[in-house]
Image: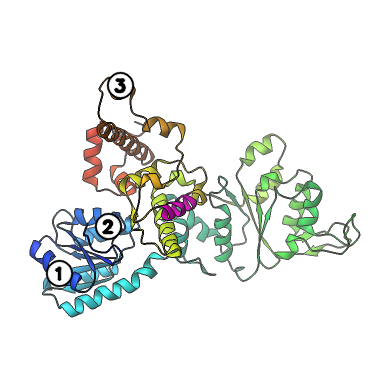
């Protein structure tokens, strides 16, 4: 790392010719930028993984990985650094193709220094737009859903289901653990539906006392019960023209379920104390963190209501099942927080990323957001494991503990014990991801953000098999 002021924008120069790297570095320094150098594509990608680079200047023709391969891998790893490709006169057509694949721009050889610096400056201006995630607009596109939810295979499948069912009036049952993002899914369905201009009304079925739930849902007339001093519409009426989310539907009292079923079937509600039904035009979504089939077997949930709610179902996978989204969210929260705090935090160390991947995330995205925000507050330039207030699970804690024989009998120095412990953690993480990918080494390499050769060599080193479940 250069001793240049860390606040200077960093430009990565990747070229296999040392003289080219040197002349371009001198030009960057003259322009008030901090140059970083890489002699091949793999070295460039390692630097880009740290998320410290503001602009990457990559030669299309490099050994080990060419510039277009680095660009493709960076996109798969959610690296949001603008990439400018260096193309010889005969490679311009390839550079244009790479721009279609996501490159910011390209420059040709021999270099026009003024044009090159202008291109880099424009990329620096545009990097904020690339790095700040967009909020989901009223008419959400698939790209904006990917930005909000992640682009892993499980989430891509879920987003496809959202887009399939959103234009309909199907009742959708959304399942998943507490904090997994069920309401985010419900709002996305509403935003992609023809009802998006109408209200979105969530109701927490577990937070309302049983004596009041019917009034809350269906409304009441004046004098219908003690304290009913005036007539009041319920959530069904409030949501008319839009979408009603019955959150944690498993908590709905059995006594209220028949009236809910009737309201869903007839699209009419009777206020408590009312004499006439009121028609409502709504789409109903329901969510639960419980297995409703066990509730039906126990007599706590009506079968007919379950089948009425479950016209279409969407499961929100927990964060631990989609490790590539852990990295996606971590980087997203880092960029938002460093902008909020006006801190020049450059990214995560390799060990910090490994710790994030090894953690089970019982609190899902909310927990990850809080941990990353605290880490940005604590660190200076790079987030390291000690900045992450993660309390590992019992299984993870065991893997982090040095072996008793190694500590006592071998009498190893601290440095060697730490190295051995890190190797043990690394082996456990690789084994865990291989199990998740059913032995697919290429998929495991993509999730862990390393190249295929690295994952192959580490599997060989640690004696890991690619057979599923081993």
In the image shown, does 79 or 456 lie closer to the viewer? 79
Mark 2 touching mark 1, by CB under 8 A?
Answer: no
Magenta region: which residues? 368-378
Calculate the distance from the C-alpha at mark 1 to the C-alpha at mark 3.
52 Å
> Given contact means CB atoms under 8 Å apart, are the residues at marks 1 and 3 in contact?
no
Question: In the drawing, what numbered circle is on residue 48?
Answer: 2
Residue at x 46%, y 35% (from the top left corner): 393
| Total residue callouts | 3
Secondary structure beneath disc 1?
helix
- Please say whether residue 373 is one of the residues in the magenta stretch: yes
Q: Which residue is mark 1?
A: 26
Q: Where does residue 417 sit, x and y in percent of width and height?
A: 28, 31
Q: Is residue 253 visible?
A: yes
Would you say 11 lies left or right of 340 here? Answer: left
Q: Earlier in the sequence, mark 3 or mark 2?
A: 2
Is label 3 in contact with label 2 (beta carbons under 8 Å)? no
Say few, some or many: other residues with alpha carbon within 10 Å of mark 3 (under 14 / 14 to 19 / 20 or more): few
Most extreme residue toward the top is 409
Spatial distance from mark 3 to mark 2, Cα to Cα?
40 Å
Of callouts 1 and 3, the N-terminal one: 1
């Amino acid at each position: 790392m250069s001793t240049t002021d860390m606040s200077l924008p960093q430009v990565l120069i990747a070229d296999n010719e040392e003289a080219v790297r040197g002349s371009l570095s001198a030009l960057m320094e003259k322009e008030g930028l901090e140059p970083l150098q890489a002699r091949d594509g793999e070295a460039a990608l390692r630097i880009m993984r740290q998320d410290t680079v503001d602009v990457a200047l990559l030669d299309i023709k490099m050994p080990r990985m060419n510039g277009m391969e680095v660009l493709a891998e960076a996109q798969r790893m959610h690296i949001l650094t603008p990439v400018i490709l260096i193309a010889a006169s005969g490679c311009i057509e390839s550079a244009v193709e790479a721009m279609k694949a996501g490159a910011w721009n390209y420059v040709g050889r021999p270099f026009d220094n003024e044009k090159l610096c202008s291109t880099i400056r424009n990329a620096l201006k545009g990097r904020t737009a690339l790095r700040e995630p967009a909020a989901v607009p009223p008419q959400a596109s698939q790209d904006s859903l990917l930005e909000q939810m992640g682009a892993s295979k499980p989430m891509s499948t879920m987003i496809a289901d959202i887009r399939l069912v959103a234009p309909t009036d199907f009742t959708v049952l959304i399942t998943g653990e507490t904090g997994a993002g069920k309401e985010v899914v419900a709002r996305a369905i509403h935003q992609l539906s023809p009802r998006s201009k109408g209200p979105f009304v969530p109701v927490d079925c577990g937070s309302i006392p049983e004596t009041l739930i019917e009034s809350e849902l269906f409304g009441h007339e004046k004098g219908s019960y003690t304290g009913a001093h005036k007539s009041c519409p319920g959530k069904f009426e409030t949501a008319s023209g839009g979408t009603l989310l019955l959150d944690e539907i498993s908590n709905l009292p059995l006594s209220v379920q028949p009236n809910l079923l009737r309201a869903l079937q007839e699209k009419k509600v009777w206020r408590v104390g009312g004499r006439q039904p009121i028609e409502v035009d709504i789409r109903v979504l329901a969510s639960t963190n419980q297995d409703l089939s066990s509730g039906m077997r126990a007599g706590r949930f009506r079968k007919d209501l379950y089948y009425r709610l479950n016209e279409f179902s969407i499961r929100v996978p927990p964060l631990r099942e989609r490790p590539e989204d852990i990295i996606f969210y971590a980087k997203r929260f880092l960029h938002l927080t460093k902008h909020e705090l006006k801190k020049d935090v450059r990214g995560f160390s390799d060990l910090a990323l490994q710790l994030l991947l090894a953690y089970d995330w019982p609190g899902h995205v909310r927990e990850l957001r809080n941990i990353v925000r605290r880490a940005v507050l604590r660190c200076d330039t790079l987030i390291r494991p000690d900045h992450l207030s993660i309390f590992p699970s019992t299984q993870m804690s065991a893997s982090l503990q040095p072996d008793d024989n190694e500590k006592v009998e071998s009498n190893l120095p601290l440095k060697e014990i730490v190295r051995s412990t890190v190797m043990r953690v690394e082996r456990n993480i690789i084994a865990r991801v291989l199990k998740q990918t059913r032995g697919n080494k290429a998929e495991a390499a993509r999730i862990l953000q390393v190249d295929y050769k690295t994952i192959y060599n580490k599997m060989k080193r640690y004696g890991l098999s690619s057979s599923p479940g081993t």
